[in-house]
Image (tube, coloured by chain):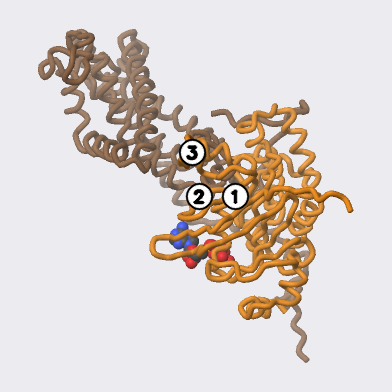
Chain colours: A orange, B brown
Amino acid sequence: MSAVQITKPLVEVRDVHKSFDQLEVLKGIDLDIMPGEVVVILGPSGSGKSTLLRCINHLEAVHRGFIAVDGEQIGYRIQNNRLEKLSPNGIARQRRKIGMVFQQFNLYPHMTVLQNIIEAPVGIHGESRKEATRNALQLLERVGLSEKAHSYPRQLSGGQQQRVAIARALAIKPKLMLFDEPTSALDPELVGEVLATMRDLARQGLTMIVVTHEISFAREAADRVVFMDDGKIVEMGKPDDVIGNPQHSRTKAFLARFL
Amino acid sequence: MKANNVTSASPDGDASFRDVATAHVPFRLGRLLLWAVILIVTVDFTWIVARNENFGWPVVAQYFFDPTVISGLYVSLGLTVVAMTLGTIIGLALAIARMSDDRLASSFAALFIWFFRGTPLLVQLIFWYNLSTLFPQLSLAVPFGPTLASWDTNSVITPMTAAIVGLALNEAAYMAEIIRGGLLSVDRGQTETAEAFGMTRARALWRIIIPQAMRSIVPPTGNQLISMIKATSLVSVIAMADLLYSVQSIYNRTFEIIPMLLVAVIWYLLITSILNVGQSYIEAYYGRGERRNGAEAKPTDTGAAVEEPSH
Ligand SMILES: Nc1ncnc2c1ncn2[C@@H]1O[C@H](COP(=O)(O)OP(=O)(O)OP(=O)(O)O)[C@@H](O)[C@H]1O
Ligand SMILES: [Mg+2]
């Protein structure tokens, strides 16, 4: 037997609680994600999936517990043996290794596709414009949109916009990619092209957390499926187990709608 | 079974007849008549004005490029540019302060805007000009502590500085609200995306938010600029030799009031027209991502085909 390589989780979520005013949205979430793992989060509307995702890159602050990415606790640092809140610019620095893809694409409408992609690499990561452009054109080729480099986002279809948004997030060479319902705003015939791109990324070993309602994607591409309901993780495991043979009644009820 | 023929819903007319490329605009007689009436009235009115001796057109022509008028024009333009630039910069700072979570900053900005929008510009100008009667000495000092430097107010507040300070601060109050409206008009998701990519707030504002806000900031700013050019004529009350002041100084000598005022009016209209042209170019620039079918951005012929949005 070969020696077992002990790897640390890339993402550690420990006993995370989060409320909006009186409403408790996350009620103690524990989740470890290993490098290269593809985790799909399923769950009914309002169960806290987006909130969990947004807590991971600290777009929302958690109220209890902690979240660490790549060993760094996002939003905080340890100073003199005490936990200290980071300044906005400090948090900005931590986020730079996390890519995010939004339901509404959120491309910068005043920039061309190419400018959208090189904005962060050149402006934040200090890459040279030439290097970033070459890299961007490669990414565009990968998502099948080479000929759209000089179009503006509004001249593209929804599916094309979302593929550009994925290329834009990849351009910062992220250690972790977060997808929040990347296909929910798309017409059914455009969903396939975006999912195909994501399946490619999954195969290439990118660590991904994907919130989606696409059960087929979860079944084919996920290493692990997490089912959330009412702010808690109800069930978690291999896609074949959670989707194929759910144990919990709420998981069963949720999945029944997709059969 | 009843077949519903969708391809030609209307029974008469074959396909080539219904091709919209062959459509033409029907002749509209009413519209033509309206145009004719308006044209005739306009030409007639121009003719009457041009032939009216009382307007003194020869005098207008004689003084149009008079050195006094031209130097007044420079003063008006210079004041406009300086006051508008300062006003916009201060206005941007105020808008950001007004929108910040910091209560102190946002209250201060609100107070500033409340005061400078709520009092007449003319009164503000006179106050600045007469600052020396209120504060004979201006000094730089540690609060409640020693004085570091001190100046005679009259030597600092000349008509020029009074005019610049007065116009700029007043403008800042209006620009602050215009800019704030523009910043608020940008989709919240854009700020969030910039944040998620790890941009600092300053960078997000500069690269992502402001360029998009410009679409709604530019048109009212054009208005402000035109108002400002005319507002500079108020400084004639504090003895600044602007365009209006210079034509006044001429007609005080020659008593040709109407022709001299016409000189000023025509200059103001000329400047305004030039500004309108400039504004439409700026609007087109900031609307570039909006045209769905518009031309794509042209790649430059070098390999690095990216044009920096320059701002
Ligand atoms: N900024 C906010 N302020 C107040 N309540 C919020 C906010 N964001 C989310 N919520 C609430 O938190 C709960 C969870 O929201 P969340 O967006 O995480 O759900 P979700 O699982 O992503 O649902 P969906 O599948 O519809 O996207 C909801 O009840 C929502 O109303
Ligand atoms: Mg959601």
Three-letter amino acid code at disc 2? Asp
> How many numbered marks, from 0 up?
3
Q: Residues within 10 Å of mark 2 (few under 14, many from 20)?
A: few
Judge from the rendering whether residue A201 lies leftward or rightward of residue B210; answer left or right: right
Residues tagged by mark 2 and mark 3 found on one chain of the structure: no
Residue ID at (23%, 14%): B140
Name the subunit of mark 3: A
Q: Residues within 10 Å of mark 1 (few under 14, many from 20)?
A: many
Of residue B198 and residue A74, the one placed in the foreground of this image is A74
Can see residue B3? Answer: yes
Residue ID at (54%, 46%): B190
Of residue B163 and residue A244, the one placed in the foreground of this image is A244
Cα gap from disc 2 to disc 3, whole angstroms: 40 Å
Residue B144 horizontal/vertical position (percent)? 16, 20
Three-letter amino acid code at disc 3? Asn
Residue pointed to by mark 2: B187
Is label 3's Cβ within 8 Å of ligand 1? no
Q: Secondary structure at mark 3?
A: loop
Residue pointed to by mark 3: A81
Cα gap from disc 2 to disc 1, whole angstroms: 9 Å
User: What's the mark number on residue A106?
Assistant: 1
